[in-house]
Amino acid sequence: MKLGYQTAKDAEKISHLLYMDDLKLYGKSEIKIQLLTNTVRVFSTDISMQFGMEKCATVSTKRGKITTCDGIEMPNGQLIKYNQNEAYKYLGILQLDNIKHGEVNTIVRREYTNRVRKILKSKLNGGNTIKAMNTWAVPVIRYMAGIVNWTQSDLDILDRKTRKLMTMH
């Protein structure tokens, strides 16, 4: 039985996305997700790895809309909770049934601004301040740049705020 989810008629089935220790499973039904989860559990047990049950959650969608489900019961009786409205992080990006662009923009803007403030409070000389900003603050935005929607006005506001902070310090 080939498990997974097919996004289009001619497309390949996707059963999972794996990056380091982040795993996302895809299935056409709760039963198929249950089978995929059990397969992952078997492999994890074989290599003496454990599920981080506190980080596990399920989201069920039908025709692009979030639906309710009971969660997934593991063979040992533990339940992987159903996560209807709470976004989760996959590779540092808030998601649910899609990427939460507004929430991620707010978080990124706040983190970038905090880092800029810390750099400016450090009293580095001009050249080192710019280097610090380019190596510690700007990567926060750059990591999300191709994933999260940024409008030109968002970027202009961030630019003005950066310049204002630099002038203040």
Image: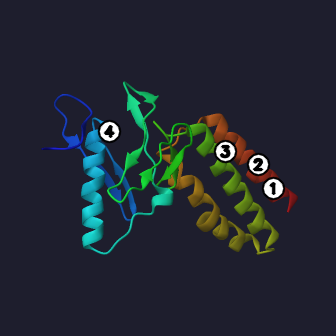
Picture quarter with the C terminus:
bottom right
The first of marks 4 and 2 along the sequence is: 4
Quadrant of residue 111 within the rendered picture: bottom right
- Side of 89 relative to 41 (left or right): right
Gap in angstroms between the C-alphas marked 4 and 3: 33 Å
Q: Earlier in the sequence, mark 1 or mark 4?
A: 4
Nearest to the observer: residue 41 or residue 66: 41
Q: Label 4, on which residue?
A: 30
Q: Is residue 145 above or below residue 53?
A: above
Q: Quadrant of the N terminus?
A: top left
Question: The residue under label 2 is which amino acid type?
Answer: Lys
Q: Which mark is residue 165?
A: 1
- Closer to the chain start, of discs 4 and 3, is 4
Task: Looking at this view, name the residue that lies furthest to the top.
Answer: 63
| Residue annotated with mark 2 | 161
Label at residue 152: none
Total residue callouts:
4
Distance, label 1 to label 3, CA atoms, is 18 Å
Classify mark 4: residues with Cα within 10 Å, few (<14), some (14-19) or many (20+): some
Give the class, few, some or many, for how many residues have Cα within 10 Å of label 3's Cα (few <14, many ≥20). Answer: few
Ranked by sequence position, the earlier of labels 2 and 3 is 3
Q: Secondary structure at mark 4?
A: helix
Does dot 2 land on a helix, a strand or a loop?
helix
The foreground one among 66 and 82 is 82
The residue beneath circle 3 is 106
| Residue furthest left as drawn | 1
Q: Mark 2 touching mark 1, by CB under 8 A?
A: yes
- Gap between marks 2 and 3, in whole Å? 14 Å
